[in-house]
Image (cartoon, grey):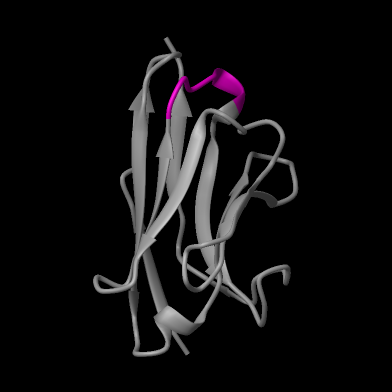
Amino acid sequence: QVHLVESGGGLVQPGGSLRLSCAASGSIFSRNAMGWYRQAPGKQRDLVARISSSGDTTGYADSVKGRFTISRDNAKNTVYLQMNSLKPEDTAVYYCGYGSSYYSFPTYWGQGTQVTVSS
């Protein structure tokens, strides 16, 4: 099992940027596809972006394409989410997670980090 800890959230104005990090413990990190998800109050947890174990393949929700970039550094056991041109509707708790495969809904999660986009 891999233990996940997210960081980098905060309050930002519309149009601003944030970079989220998800640090993982455990030697199997490099063998797992990873994903970033978000959950707004009263809503379900939805996929934001996912990345394959090698980092060669990525996928994004339509709502964030062209604005967000997922990446990973397997040497540092860390996955990142660069978020640019942030909008108020991006406000949510952001979670990183992993499951059994690239397309699997995660079964393991971090504790989440709050992102608030507001003027």
* Horizontal and vertical percent position of residue 99: 63, 77
Q: Quadrant of residue 90?
A: top right
Q: Quadrant of residue 22?
A: bottom left
What residue is drawn where x is 34% and y is 40%?
19
Q: Is residue 2 left or right of residue 51?
A: left
Q: Quadrant of residue 115?
A: top left
What residue is drawn where x is 69% and y is 52%?
45
Q: Is residue 17 above or below residue 97?
A: above
Q: Is residue 32 left or right of residue 25?
A: right
Residue 86 inside the magenta-drawn segment: yes
What residue is drawn where x is 47% and y is 41%?
69
Magenta-drawn segment: 84-89
What residue is drawn where x is 37% and y is 47%?
20
Q: Is residue 17 above or below residue 9?
A: above
**Does residue 13 show up?**
yes
* Horizontal and vertical percent position of residue 104: 72, 72
Q: Is residue 91 above or below residue 77?
A: above
Q: How many marks?
A: 0
**79 and 93: which is toward the camera:** 79
* Horizontal and vertical percent position of residue 73: 32, 64
Which SS does the magenta portion mostly show? loop
Residue 22 inside the magenta-drawn segment: no
Q: Residue furthest top?
A: 119
**Does residue 9 show up?**
no
